[in-house]
Image (tube, helix red, strand yellow):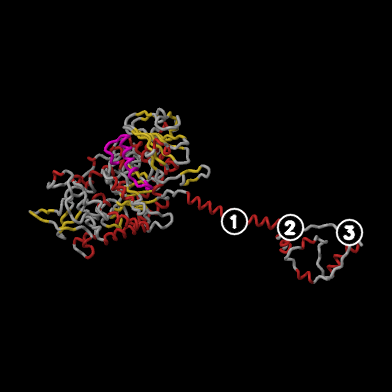
Amino acid sequence: VEVEARSLPMELSEKGGVENNGFVQNEAFEDEETDTSSQEEMPKTCSVDVEPVAVEETVLKPYAGMPKEVLLQFSSQARYRVTREILFWLIIAGAVALVCATIAIIALSPKCLDWWQASPIYQIYPRSFKDSNMDGNGDLKGIQEKLDHITYLNIKTVWITSFFKSPLKDLGYGAEDFYDIDPIFGSMRDFENLIAAIHDKGLKLIMDLIPNHTSDKHQWFQLSRNRTGKYTDYYIWQDCTQAAGSVIPPNNWVSVFGNSSWQFDDVRKQCYFHQFGKEQPDLNFRNLAVQQEIQDIINFWLGKGVDGFSFGAVKFLLEATHLRDEPPVNKSQNGVIITAYSQLYHDYTTTQVGLHDIIRGFRHTINQFSREPGRYRFMGTGDDEKEDIEATVMYYGTTFIQEADFPFNFNLINMKNLSGNSIFEAVDLWMKNMPAGKWPNWAVGSPNAARISTRIGKEYVNVMNMLLLTLPGTPVTYYGEEIGMENIVSEDVSEEHVNSGPVATLPEKSPMQWDGEVNAGFTEGNSSWLPVSSDYQSVNVEIQSTWSNSTLSLYRALTLLRNNELPMNRGWMCYIWNDSDVFVYVRELDGLDRVFMMVLNFGQESTIDLKAIVPNLPSEAVIRLSTHFSNAGKVVNTKLIKTEMGEGLVLEYKSAKPVHTMEAFQGKCFVAEKACYSKALDLLYVNC
């Protein structure tokens, strides 16, 4: 029987039956997809009684390279099918969770700071920055040569003042051609090369545009004075009365530079209106064709790759049509000939109804170029209202209608005296009047104001830069302030220089001081368009870059601190203390226990007990940065903080209790782009 049983498989195979590989157990063939056609061909088999112990059981297991038929036998088994289904649903659940987490992170994450918020802005007066062709005038190629200096300062935004083709009256702000570069600065090819180099270095470019007026050499004015077609009303013309050989203007309006703002034109035999110099006639912005001309100019330069504009003198764009006399500041002067701009209230020549509609038109044009991802175009306005902060902040627009990203803030320049209290008042004035959710900005120098060293003293240069770079918002640095340049002496300005613009604004436009060589490295020519300051051998970029305690080194350390520390670039600011000598404030971020406290001295030597002012303030803090570099890293007692005249400290300490949550400081804290830090996830979120 045993012999017959062993030979049975071979006999079945030879008769066309199905080979069973040694009598594998029947469950291996329970798969529904088994080839039933072959089973039908099997001949009837006979049953053979075999002792169970006589047959060796063989179990088929999965193996590499198994054919499809064998694989299918296992795939439907519960242990494989269930595992497969579990893995499938785990993958689905994981994908859904990932999508939900991504949506949640996007919804909860604060808006990233845009480029005009994240970096300081470096303002360049191009004629005084760097001369590349030895003619004594700075130019666009010179700026391109010195772009590494801007990256060295950890700055990513360059603001270049007007470089349009111009007779250079009023320092070039009256354009002869808005579509061309003045030859003194180079060519359009030079500009294209400059902007390409700027973008190659990851920088952005803002340019000036003064739409209020043109030069009297502009083609539009020449056509208008001859009453040619549509250009007839491109400017503001009025009949004048002539008596005894002199011209009697239509009213008492006075130009910013003094004397009547009306000038008689011999060609047209009428008076044209000018808010500034007589060589700069005002455009008629009540003429829609003029508005379209400016829109076309904006489009042209944005098409060239410009990243934003600073629109200057915009409050002068419209004048009242009734031409009434403006009221005098001193009423006793009624009927008296007024020649000074400050003698009148300018109710009819500034900030007229309809002005902000024009500004919004500029914004709309710029936004057409902001649709490209990563290419937001900036818009700033440069009017300095001085006494009227409410009029200035109106240029932010409203919650629903955007105008400027910010109007430039000159509060720190316009201070009449320097003290801890005056600094506090200048900062607080802007922060309290700025619309909620808008972004602040600060400047301590400009082409139209004396430099820090001259205006308030050399001993305060470093502490002013420390203030500028630690306040919330965007700091604006005028070229040369990073090394503490000062005004040149007015007596050094010759008659030739006066012909280039108002003498009062020339001393702060002296050539940039690059090194201790002749002409301070500004030019390799024999002379420069303005004299170089006499202190250039000790105050220059080259020598200060080698000194660890120089104004330049401190400036770089401050920009690094601002760029690298979250509380500095988007956190809360809270006023802690101010008196005649010091101004103290903190920068902090929700969720981050690291706090920075600025103690800035704008008066005389002072000692202050900060622990008595701030509850829960640690008894010790570390000096992160100091205007006296040797003090950096030292530990100070917060009950006894001493500062000398012009000294500034950036203190760092840890605290679980933010100042802005303390009842004692309610109403003294501000935040523009609110964000909170999650230490566990190492990310920012908005719902604190």
Q: Nearer the viewer, mark 1 or mark 2?
A: 1
Q: Are marks 1 and 3 in contact (CB under 8 Å)?
A: no
Q: Residue at x 40, y 27 (%)?
A: 640
* Viewer-proximal residue among 545 and 380: 380
Q: Are marks 2 and 3 in contact (CB under 8 Å)?
A: no
User: Residue 435, position in %: x, y?
Assistant: 35, 47
Q: Secondary structure at mark 2?
A: loop
Q: Within 10 Å of the Cα at label 3, are there few (<14), some (14-19), or many (20+) other Cα atoms?
A: few
Give the residues drawn in magenta, as a range. 413-439
Q: Quadrant of residue 664?
A: top left
**What's under tag 2, amino acid-wise?**
Tyr
User: Residue 241, position in %: x, y?
Assistant: 11, 56
- Label 2 belongs to which residue? 63
Q: Secondary structure at mark 3?
A: loop
**What's under tag 3, amino acid-wise?**
Glu
Q: Within 10 Å of the Cα at label 1, are there few (<14), some (14-19), or many (20+) other Cα atoms?
A: few
**In terms of sequence position, does the residue under pointer 1 or pointer 2 come before the other?**
2
Q: Is residue 543 visible?
A: no
Q: Is residue 306 visible?
A: yes
- Label 3 belongs to which residue? 51
**In terms of sequence position, does the residue under pointer 1 or pointer 3 come before the other?**
3
The quadrant the N terminus occupies is: bottom right
Q: Residue at x 46, y 36 (%)?
A: 657
User: CA gap, disc 1 to disc 2?
Assistant: 29 Å
User: Residue 358, position in %: x, y?
Assistant: 29, 56
Does residue 454 appear to the left or right of 94 in the view shown?
A: left
Q: Within 10 Å of the Cα at label 2, are there few (<14), some (14-19), or many (20+) other Cα atoms?
A: few
- Label 1 belongs to which residue? 92
